Image (cartoon, rainbow, N blue to C red):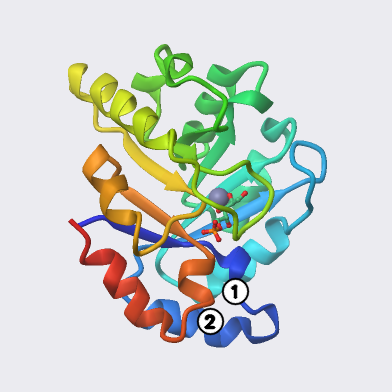
Amino acid sequence: MPIVAPSLLAADFLKLQDECTMLNESQADWYHLDVMDGRFVPNISFGPMLIEFFRKATNKVCDVHLMIEDPGNYAEAFKKAGADHLSVHIEACRNLHRNIQQIKELGMKAGVAINPHTPVEQLQDILADIDLVCMMSVNPGFGGQKFIPYTLTKIKQLRRMIDERGLSVLIEIDGGVTLDNAHSIIAAGADVLVAGNTVFKSADPKATIAGLKAIS
Ligand code: DX5
Ligand code: ZN
């Protein structure tokens, strides 16, 4: 069964308590929380303050995806806010290994996120040190975009790299995931499905989450 991580970016922020209750009662595994700074990506979302509220609202894993410059400056703040996983973009880190060590020393699981144009080969030397790769299947910054099909090739390449070395790094796919394309994403070798609009804009979000969980 895939791990399902609804992205709260697509939630109704006037009804956040209801959205959290729905997720808590659903088969969702993780809360996927998208932090944007208006510099690394052309959009601004939310920061540690809101994550503190999500932390209080759920016992599920808080999977925080940082789309920000200089993420090392904020790792401690996100730990304090209650993040369980912290993913940083390879394109935003001049000292990626240092950032990963810092996240792990703070007691969080460490993820590396990669943009659609970034080859998976760039993960080779950090792969053994991380828990998760957040592979972007759209350009980061906005929910509701169309899945980039070449991602499927990248998932297969990364799956091979992980399996050849006997590692247990999770492959998380982020952007444009739907009930229609989820099967090919899982078949290519992904472990985690992030889904924003597919879940929150559906008529029955809980059933949609169950539908994603049932994909094999
Ligand atoms: C995009 C974010 C995604 C986004 C996914 O920058 O990282 O997590 O919320 O939204 P959907 O599933 O609507 O493409
Ligand atoms: Zn994300």
From this view, report whether residue 215 is shown above or below residue 188: below
Which residue is found at the position 35% from the left and 54% from the top? Answer: 181
Asked which quadrant contains residue 75, the reply is top right
Q: Secondary structure at mark 1?
A: loop
Marks 1 and 2 sit apart, C-alpha to C-alpha, by 7 Å
Find disc 2 in the rendering and name its residue: 19
Point out which mark residue 11 bears.
Answer: 1
Which residue is found at the position 63% from the left and 16% from the top? Answer: 95
The amino acid pointed to by label 1 is Ala
Q: Quadrant of the N terminus?
A: bottom left
Q: How many marks?
A: 2
Which residue is found at the position 64% from the left and 43% from the top? Answer: 140
Q: Secondary structure at mark 2?
A: helix
Q: Position of residue 123 (x, y in %)?
A: 44, 19
Point out which mark residue 204 bears.
Answer: none
Mark 1 sits near ligand 1, with its Cβ under 8 Å away? no
